[in-house]
Amino acid sequence: MVDKILEFGKKILDRVKEWWNKFQPKQKTLIIGIGVALLLAVSILIFVLAKKQYVPLASCESTKEAAAIRDLLDGQDLDYDISSDGLNFQILKSQEADASLLLGANDIPTAAYTLEDVVDGSFSTTEADKQKKYKYYKESRMEDHLEHMQAITEATVDITIPDDNGTLIAQNLESYASVMLTLNPDVSFTEENAAAVARFVATALGNDTTDNVTITDTATGSTLFPVEQAYSTIEKADNMMMLKQEAESLIKNEVKQVLLGTNEFNQIEVAPNVVMDFSQIKTTTHDYYAPEGHDQGLYSHQEIYKSNTQEGVGDVPGTDSNSETGYDIEESTGGVISSYQSITDYLPGEKITEEIPAIGTIVYNSSTISVAAVRFRVVREDDVRLQGFLDGITWEEYKLANDTREKIEVDEDLVSLVANATGVPTRNVTVVAYEEVHFVDSVETPVAYKDIIQIVLIVIILLLLAFVVFMSLRTKREVEEEEELSVEDLLQSGQQEELESIETEQKSEARRLIENFVEENPEAVATLLRNWLDEDWG
C-alpha cells in the first residue's frame, strides 16, 4: 500500500516537473514572482478579515469602577481591550451580548449606542442593516431620556419605522411607537405627564401628532396614553375643550387618510372647526288615557253638597221701628229653595317619557373644514445633470431658479369626498392645493478605508489570476506551434546536421592518419611522392 502511494506521488511529481520544464527561464521567473505576489495579497486579505473587531463596552468614571469591570470580564474569560487611561473598555464584537448581560446583572451601565455605530458600516453592510441599527439607536436614546424622569424607573421603547421604498407617500408616513413604563410609586404620574411623554416620543420620531404613540403601565397593564375614545372619553372629559379637540383630531385623521388614499397629494394639512352642542335640555312628555271599560278616568276625590228651604211668611225686617214709610215694600209670602254642589277629581292613566340629549354632539351644519394639500414634483440632481441642464451653473443655483409653487384647481369630487367622510356639508368645506418642486440631491455614500483595502486586494488578485491564465495559454500555444512542425523538416534538419558532423569527423580522422603515416614513414612518403611526380612529368 505504501509503495503504491509513493509510486502515485512520484507520477504526480514527474508530471509537475514535465509541465514546469515546458517554460522558458524568463517565464519561470515571472510565474514565481506572480505566485509570491498572489500569496502576499491573499495573506493581507486574510489578515484584514481575520483581525479582531472590538466595540465600545463601558466608560468608567473612576478607576475603582474600572477595576470591578475588569474582574468581571476576567472571571468569564472574555476578550476585551482597555484604554491607556484604564477607564474605557472595548469588547470583542462576537462577545458583546454576553458582556452587556454580565454588566447589566451587576448593575453596571454599558456604553450607549451612538450614531457612529449606525453610520460606521463595513463593506458587507446593507441598507437594511443600517436601517435596523438606526432603529435600535432611536429606541436606546429615547429609553435613556425617559429614564431620567423622576416618575419613571424603567422604560422600554419599541418603534416601527415605515419602509422607505423611494416613493413620496412612504416618506410622509409617520412612525409608530409603543412605550412600556415602570413607574416610581413615590412620585405622582398624571395624565398630563403621560401626554408630555407621548409628545416627547412623537417629536423624537418626527411625527406631527401623538396619534401613533401608545404608553402602557407595566405594573397594572393599563393604558396611560391615549385616553379611551368615544363615549368613555365623554365620561372622563374634564371640560368641553377636551371633547372638541378629540372630535377635531378624529375628523382630521379621517380627512388625511381619505385624501392620501387618492395618491394625488404628498402633504396634507387639515384644520377643522367643529361646533358642538353642550346644552342639557330635559324634555318630559305626559300621555293620558282612560282605563279599559270607562269613558273617563277613575275617581281620586269626590265632594257633593245639597241645601233645601221650606215654605213660610216673613215680615220685612226693620219696619217695626218705623212709624211711617215713604216707599212700598212687597211682603213675602214664602216658598222652597234647593241647592246642590258636586266636586270630582279624576285619576286617568298616565305615561311619562323623559328625553335628555347626549352632551357634546357635533353640529355638522355649523362646523367647517379647511384643507391645504401639496403635490411634489420630484427633480433629481442625477437626472438634471444627465440632461445637461447644469452646464455652466451649480445645482444650488438651479434649485433657486426653479423653486416655484403653482396653485392647482381643485376638483369638486375632492370637496365631496371630504364632506362625505366627515358629514360636514360641502358648502362648509374649503380645499386649496399647490404643486411644489421637491429637489433630491445626489447621494454620496462614504467608503471606509477597510472597504477600499478589500476592493484593492480583490482587484489585484483578479489581475494576477488573469495574467497567470494568459501566460499559461500563451505557453501552451507556443508548444503546440512547435509540435506542428512537419516530420520531414525535422528529419531533413537532423540528417543535415548529422552529415555535417560526419564530414567534419571524417576529415579530422583522415588528416590524423596521414599525419601519423608521414611522421612514422617519411622515406616511404618521399618515394611515393617521387613516383607521382615521375608519372606526371613522364
Image (cartoon, rainbow, N blue to C red):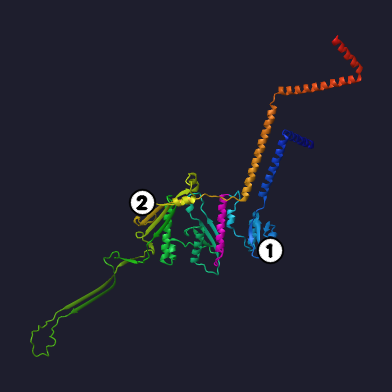
The residue located at (52%, 62%) in the rendering is 216
Q: Secondary structure at mark 2?
A: helix
Amino acid, disc 1: Ala
Which residue is identified by label 1? 67
Between 404 and 215, the residue placed more toward the observer is 404
Amino acid, disc 2: Glu
| Residue 11 in picture, x, y percent from top left | 75, 34
| Residue 483 in picture, x, y percent from top left | 70, 27
Task: Tell me where residue 141 sits by quadrant.
Answer: bottom right
Instruction: Give yes or no for residue 118 being in the magenta stretch.
Output: no
**From this viewpoint, which residue is outermost toward the front?**
537
Q: Which residues are magenta?
A: 126-155
| Residue 380 in picture, x, y percent from top left | 48, 48
- Whether residue 449 appears in this view of the structure is yes
In this view, 454 is above or below 69? above
Task: Tell me where residue 353 sits by quadrant.
Answer: bottom left
Task: Tell me where residue 97 sits by quadrant.
Answer: bottom right
Which residue is identified by label 2? 412
